[in-house]
Image (tube, rainbow, N blue to C red):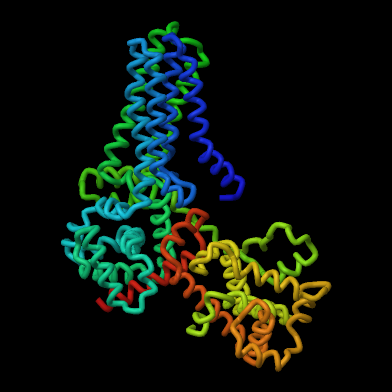
Amino acid sequence: MNDFFKTILWFAYIGADWIAIVTLGKLSGSHVESTATNVLRAYWAPLLLVHLGGPDTITACTFEDNKLWIRHLISLLVKVFFVIYVICMSWTFSWLSFFTLPLILAGIIKYVEKILCLKLSNSQKTKPLISNMFNLQSHSDLNENQTLDRLQKENPTVLSAYLFFTIMRPDVNDYLSSENLSDVGTRIKAYLRETTGIDGRRAFQFADKYLALSLGKDVFEIIFIQLGFMFDAAYTKASLIHTKLGCFLRLASSTSFFSVLLLFFIDIIKKPKFHGSRIDIAITGFLLSGAIAQEFYATWVIHSSDWAVLVAEFHHNVLVRKVFKITSKYFPRLLRQSRRWSNQMGQFDLLAYCWRCKKRKANQSHGFLPKITIGNEIAEMWHKYCIIIWHLATIVCYLQEDNHDGENMEISKCASDYMMYLLAMCPALLLSGYGESFWLVHAYDNLKGLLPPAIDIRNAASKLFSNPDNAHEEELESREITFENLKGEVLKLVTILKQLDNKWEMLRDVWIEMLLYAAVSSRYINHVKLLGEGIELFSLIWLLAGTSVLSSVFQME
């Protein structure tokens, strides 16, 4: 999604409540008598609640919005009070007035769905609700060979992705960084026993064989589907609509919409002269039709998603399984696209940026390069300048090369710029405890001051990182890395790299190690927040590393 649509979506999300409050205020102020026109306009008040509930595909723009569910609950109580007031002021004891009652029910249901999803996404209760959607206990009692044959023939990729999604949950977050795999296995088994009621050892046996079936040709597809499940659980109504409560609420709201729409048009046809102006009739019909269209769209999304595959295969109700199997054949799969993410990775060249900004005003806004298509010693330096020093060293070595066609060279350059992009745009992912790019800002200030005047970035880098001072190097060895000796540390690393015949292979391995270390060390919640901005390569690496760790745990258990 580009920035233009993101801006429109953000304004619609933020302004919806304000527009609803203003509209309810206007409606409540205009109903001084029970006329036919006012009775029609009374329909608009509960329909506002329906549309404020929003579609199933979005409940929050950012993960922090889930924490505001109490505010939405209070807002619902206030809006319901105004809606009831508007209807009471327009009440005529006619059929049109009675039709507003199921609309109030439908509006409250849609709004409550949103509040429940916000609360579930912000609490630990999300996991049992999602897990209990399927009869996992019965599934664990099936014959193992029959189950594996069934999965291999039908949808092993989606089912494998869901299994790993079920295991990698927030209450066991950060277990990937644990050094003791037996502790990891104990925590995961306890989690499975608590949320699904199945034996952890049995689940591990299934999981290991699911992984063996799917790894290789489908491993990235599994990762993409996992990220989709994570996004749905955090930002959509998926955590509710696939439960018994969610199905009941959806049935009640849909029944209310269809019955009111049908009875409304029947009454309009029979008594066209007693319902006010045609404009009010058209507006009312448009709002009712919009609510019906939203229900059809929600049904389409439900039956065309990866969740539908799970329901069709593993729902505890046989009738529900049959219905989903039939409908899934006639609904086009929205998620069966050529790709599930943008295949892009952000890029930021610190040296080039500093050289460009040297010609600009100090307060000018930041700019980044466009996106492109795609250690123990490292860990000791991690929290300060490790990324910056290795990034600058990689850039200097890259600029000194006459031929940029090497595969390892391009991989190193792209990975280096990507890590700097993350450090600049998402510092919390890499530097735990730092809300802003503290180290990057100071490195930028120092590097900008050290860069000599030059006609291009290559000449500037050559002048800055040349003729090493041996005395200065010896002094650096006894001091901690600070802002003042940043140049010396980069120069020292460049000098060592120049002496290596396989420097680009080494740099490639270093950056891959850094990406893995950063991805595994980052907390689960950071990756969930990142999904709100679109699937990032960083989260893909995290899940790949997690799959590898889980495979080791399964085999050991």
- Residue 313: give x, y in percent of width and height: 27, 53
The one of 314 and 145 positioned closer to us in this rendering? 314
> Considering only vertical position in the picture, is 226 above or below 76?
below
Instruction: Identify whether 498 is placed above or below 173.
Output: below
The foreground one among 443 and 412 is: 443
Residue displayed at 33% across by 43% down: 327
* Residue at figure coordinates x 48%, y 53% from the top left: 337
Residue under the image location 33 percent in, 65 percent down: 172
- Using residue 466 as the reference point, say whether residue 496 is left or right of it: left
Q: Position of residue 377 (x, y in %)?
A: 51, 85
Q: Relative to 176, is 441 on the left or the right? A: right
Specify whether 282 is left or right of 124.
Answer: right
**Residue 137 sits in which quadrant?**
bottom left
Instruction: Pick the quarter of the image with the C terminus.
Output: bottom left
Image coordinates of residue 447 in percent, x first then y, are: 71, 73
The quarter holding residue 545 reads: bottom left
Q: Residue 533: where, in percent of width, then height?
A: 52, 55
Q: Is residue 468 above or below residue 326?
A: below
Near-viewer residue (184 or 511): 184
> Is residue 245 among what the camera can see?
yes
Note whether 517 is above or below 339 in the view shown.
below
Q: Name the image quarter holding residue 78.
A: top left
